[in-house]
Image (cartoon, grey):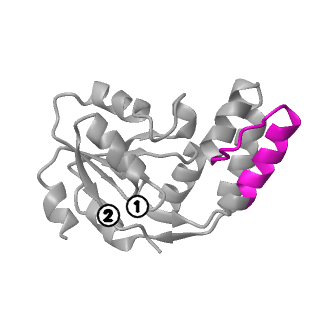
Amino acid sequence: MDVLKIVKNFDVIIWDFDGTLVELEVNWDNLKKELLNVATKVGYTEKDNTLNRILYFLIDKGFKDKAFTLLRRYENNALYKVNQKIIKVIKKTPDKKHIIISDNLKKTIIKILNQLNITPFFDLIIAKEDVTNFKPHPEGLRKILQLYSNHKILYIGDSWKDKEIAHECKVKFLEVERME
């Protein structure tokens, strides 16, 4: 699939971050265990222990800072692999409005964009701390659509969450294979 050829037909390109631009090597299982430990101490009893469910619980109980501090520590210490094909597409299309929508923290995203020398290509970043509802909720994409309503928009991502958000908001979606 020629991503560059497809991208050229749109004005605004919305990129997922982890799994699309880069592959963060975060130990999500250990992070979830640490968050679950904190949540259990303040009354969490759910059996469905997804990362976002635990985060929502902690935020609701007033422990957002603690939860995001743990998340920041794990993301900040993570190594990552770069999807060079995608980075080349971004560099070859400086005339496009490039936007990131991500369940990662903004500090992590900006740090990596700076390391890759591609920060100037991005007009906007919607990160985990910019929304109340995390993916697969479409809140982040709706914020973008309010700003760019009169543009041809393409959302590029690697996960079912990305696809679901795009579909719900009636935005063209291009699925890329998750980096391994």
Image position, residue 102 (x, y; %): 47, 46
Q: Residue at x 40, y 56 (%)?
A: 159
Residue range (magenta)? 30-50
Image position, residue 144 (x, y; %): 34, 32
2 to the left or right of 53: left
Q: Amino acid at mark 2?
A: Val
Q: Residue at x 63, y 39 (%)?
A: 53
Q: Residues within 10 Å of mark 2 (few under 14, many from 20)?
A: some
Image position, residue 31 (x, y; %): 73, 54
Dividing the picture into quarters, in which one does residue 164 lie? top left
Q: Is residue 62 above or below residue 178?
A: above
> Mark number for residue 59?
none
98 to the left or right of 21: left
Total count of labels: 2
Dividing the picture into quarters, in which one does residue 55 lie? top right
Image position, residue 89 (x, y; %): 26, 64
Dividing the picture into quarters, in which one does residue 54 lie? top right
Q: Earlier in the sequence, mark 1 or mark 2?
A: 1
Q: Which residue is mark 2?
A: 176
Q: Residues within 10 Å of mark 1 (few under 14, many from 20)?
A: many
Q: Which residue is mark 1?
A: 20
Q: Amino acid at mark 1?
A: Thr
37 to the left or right of 178: right
* Viewer-side residue, 10 vs 26: 26
Q: Is residue 116 visible?
A: no
Can residue 41 be found in the magenta stretch? Answer: yes
* Viewer-side residue, 116 vs 48: 48
